[in-house]
Image: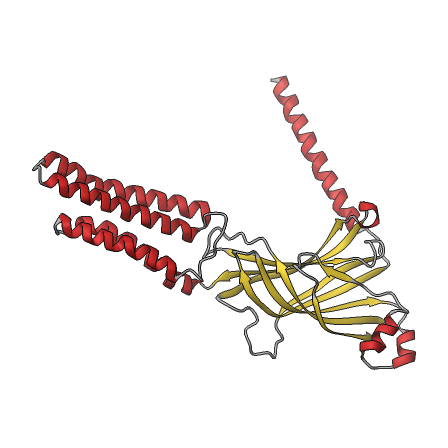
Amino acid sequence: MKKFISFIILISFFVVSSVLAASKSNLGDKNIKTEHLVEATLLFDEIYDIDISEGHYRVSVEILMAWEGDTEKFLNKFGDTIIHGSKMEKFMDEIWYPEFFVANAENPRVTHYKTLDVIGKKYELFERFEADLSIDGDMKGYPFGTLDLFMDLAAYSGNVSKMMFKPKEILIGHHDAHHRVIKGNWVEKKKYLEEEKRTSLNHGGKEKFSYLISHVNVAHNPSTAIGKILFPLLTIIVISIMVNYINISYAQRLTSQITLLLIIPALKFALEKDIPTTSYINFTDGLFILASALVFSGVLITAYANNVRSTSNTLKIKKIERLGKIVVPTLTTIFLMILIFSTII
């Protein structure tokens, strides 16, 4: 009993120590002093070409970065105006300003334009750019579930002691715009903006730099998913099972099952553009496999029953009937439940 109590105390000690260490680490991050706290607001003008198979998507983005600085230089030169182009570039050579790259971009971002302005005692640097972004195209429940469209903006004009991002807001389209921002058969479910500190090979590989990370979680349009994918496949499964309960000849049952077997690849070919090709089995892939296995087993069972019928072996025919009416539907239900729990839930 004493050994058991000692073991419990020891485990509790380790748990408390871990919690305290994590708390100290988080507190340390919050207490980091930085020269420039850069407030950042992101707005997505367009999100398009979302491709789960290739694991990428494209964006058109606006970013507004604001930080405190010696704004007198700007006001004395330009007054209450917004500068851009060569005038802005020449002035920015004289001051400190935040610089970043898109860490998960497949190639350098394409900048449309930049402007610099002063509001109160803060500089405001605006930029609109396009980028091709890579993502983790992990959507096992496809067409159900959500996909995280993230973008990592990594600061490089100084480590966290020099500058840190302060997330302000993430927006999907302008309030007065009337076009769809997220293109294709996708709808927004959630969005948020966060800041992380990550080490970099820059500066010896030990110092941390600030990352501004945006997340736009999207889901496939459920009505399209049900109408195009779920309903046709479940219909094939139900018809394949019901054929065994209809009072028709084995030859007619065999013809029906073979017809269903041919419909399945035709349906998959028709949905080729809608179904992503992934390295894992998603829910839609599983449904196609289940439907194919069910119908193929129906073909084999019906063909065998048709041959046995000619022998007038009543006992064997009853066993085959039980196999088609009870065992196969039961196994189908079990595998369908396993598929749902392993991919969606």
Residue 244, horizontal then vertical, whole percent: 19, 48
Q: Determine whether, in the image, residue 253 is placed left or right of residue 47.
A: left
Residue located 64% across and 23% down the image: 7
Residue located 83% across and 77% down the image: 86
Quadrant of the rendered image containing residue 76: bottom right
Residue located 67% across and 26% down the image: 9
Q: How many marks?
A: 0
Quadrant of the rendered image containing residue 57: bottom right
Residue 198, horizontal then vertical, whole percent: 74, 50
Quadrant of the rendered image containing residue 312: top left
Q: Determine whether, in the image, residue 268 is placed left or right of residue 239.
A: right
Question: Residue 168, relative to residue 250: is it above or below?
Answer: below
Residue 251, horizontal then vertical, whole percent: 14, 50
Task: Specify whether residue 345 is in view.
Answer: no
Q: Determine whether, in the image, residue 247 is placed left or right of residue 180.
A: left
Task: Specify whether residue 8 is in view.
Answer: yes
The N terminus sits in image quarter:
top right
Image colouring: secondary structure
Residue located 25% across and 40% down the image: 327
Between 315 and 10, the residue placed more toward the observer is 315
Question: Residue 54, relative to residue 303: is it above or below?
Answer: below
Residue reaching furthest left? 312
Residue 114, horizontal then vertical, whole percent: 76, 73
Question: Residue 299, relative to residue 271: is it above or below?
Answer: above
